[in-house]
Image: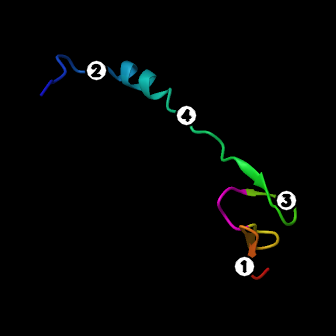
Amino acid sequence: MPVPKRKMSRSKTRSRRSQWKTTAASLATCGQCQSPKLQHTACPTCGTYNRRQVLEV
């Protein structure tokens, strides 16, 4: 199993990790009330998911 020959310096490690960026969660419009909501979740405004009423609002 290969092993690194030398210890990686802090600056090298941190510069490599600086490329790990998060992306903003994408929003979709609700089919019922047209308000923005997170994808694959029930709409917090009207309580529908996949054209069905799933939450009492």
Q: On the image, numbered disc 4 is attached to which residue? A: 21
Q: Looking at the image, is mark 4 or mark 3 earlier in the sequence?
A: 4
**Magenta span main SS:** loop
Q: Is residue 19 left or right of residue 35?
A: left
Work out how far the residue at label 4 is from the one at label 1, CA to CA, in angstroms.
34 Å
Residue 2 rendering spot, x and y as whole percentages = 15, 24
Type of the residue with mark 3: Ser
Tell me which segment is drawn in magenta.
38-42
Q: Nearer the viewer, residue 22 or 50?
A: 50
Write down the quadrant of residue 16 in the picture. Answer: top left
Residue 7 rendering spot, x and y as whole percentages = 23, 21
Q: On the image, numbered disc 1 is attached to which residue? A: 55
Q: Is residue 26 left or right of residue 34?
A: left
Q: Looking at the image, is mark 1 or mark 3 earlier in the sequence?
A: 3
Which residue occupies 65% across, 60% down?
Answer: 40
Question: Judging from the image, what secondary structure is the residue with disc 1 in?
Answer: loop
Q: Nearer the viewer, residue 23 or 32?
A: 32
Q: Looking at the image, is mark 3 or mark 2 earlier in the sequence?
A: 2
Q: On the image, numbered disc 2 is attached to which residue? A: 8
Q: Residues within 10 Å of mark 3 (few under 14, many from 20)?
A: some
Q: On the image, numbered disc 3 is attached to which residue? A: 35
Please identify the residue farthest to the left as the structure is shown.
1
Kindly indicate whether the residue at mark 3 contacts the one at mark 1 (C-beta within 8 angstroms). no
Question: Judging from the image, what secondary structure is the residue with disc 3 in?
Answer: loop
Kindly indicate whether the residue at mark 1 contacts the one at mark 4 (C-beta within 8 angstroms). no
* Quarter of the image where the N terminus is located: top left
Q: Nearer the viewer, mark 4 or mark 1?
A: 1
Type of the residue with mark 2: Met
Which residue occupies 50% across, 26% down?
Answer: 19
Work out how far the residue at label 4 is from the one at label 3, CA to CA, in angstroms.
28 Å
